[in-house]
Image (cartoon, rainbow, N blue to C red):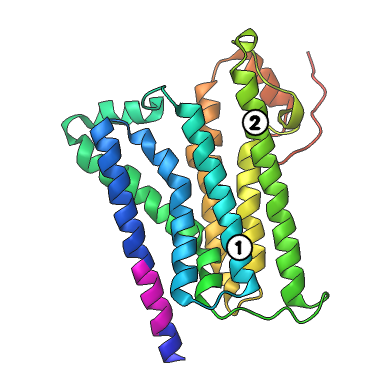
Amino acid sequence: MEDSVIEILQIYGWTGLFLLGFLLIAFIVGSLKKDNSIMDVFYGWGFILVAWSTLLLKGTFGIRQIIVTILVTIWGIRLSNYVLIRNWGKGEDKRYQNMRERWGNKVLINSLFRIYLFQGLIIFLVVFPVSFINVNDDVPLDSLISLSTLTLIFGSLVWILGFLYETIGDIQLYRFLNDPANKGKVFDKGLWRNTQHPNYFGEVTQWWGLYIVSLVIPFGFITIFGPIIITYMIINVSGVRLINKRFEGDSEYDKYRRRTSQFIPLPPKKEID
């Protein structure tokens, strides 16, 4: 038992060092380009690095470990590529520009700790259900109706639902925003008709799906802080809150918000004059 704990701590230690090196590379690139929004591109790859590091360092390659690592890889590549395409040629994101102005001549030290290393901490914590699966011995799939099989199937299906919501929502919004005829309009079609943030809902759903897969691992339930953190961050810090603040005072968006569920997809309310 003691040897197993030491091995797990060593795997997490090496993985943490790999992630730190990765974040320092992102920091150097962002500093040289004077564009800290480069971290948004590196972000998805950070999750992939942690997932694959813990898988390869443990070296057991159980079916559950392989599946969750592949799912994180698919999610991370899609997200990073989408952000890269969306931001290509547009310079530093307005959020990071505002930070740069506030921090003045202390921008480098603040950027390192408050953007790169902070997001690295978030990555390490959010992906914990997956890394926890990877550093522990896999639980065999005894039968189609066994708990180990059902958690894997159900968690994977929840992940697929979230992935579809995030991917389709991003594609629909990207097409809308890149049509000059839609300038100044509010998008309320497709998935955006039933929730103001289908992409964010999808992202959160994926991490809850991966958490479900971890429940069959001994003490896997303790990794619940991973999906809780990403849910809190997206709703109250980096996602929903920022967009609502951005469109504050926009009468058309206010109407959209009144008739549309903020997060969980629900039928739109009837508009009342």
Reading the image, the residue beneath label 1 is 68
Q: Can residue 271 be seen here? A: yes
Residue 255 position (above or below residue 232) = above
Q: Which residue is mark 2?
A: 171
The residue sitting at 64% across, 40% down in the picture is 166
Q: Nearer the viewer, residue 83 or 120?
A: 83
Q: Position of residue 118 (x, y in %)?
A: 36, 49
Q: Which residues are magenta?
A: 6-14
| Residue 240, image quadrant | top right
**Amino acid type at image mark 2:** Ile
Asked if residue 20 is among those painted magenta in the image, a careful observer would answer: no
- Residue that appears at 38% across and 83% down: 6
Disc 1 crowd rating (10 Å Cα; few below 14, some 14-19, many 20+) is many
Q: Position of residue 220 (x, y in %)?
A: 58, 73
Q: Residue furthest left?
A: 105
At label 2, counting other C-alpha atoms closer than 10 Å, the crowd grade (few under 14, some 14-19, many 20 or more) is few
Q: Kindly identify the residue that appears in the image at 65 percent across and 42 percent down.
A: 201
**187 displayed left or right of 272:** left
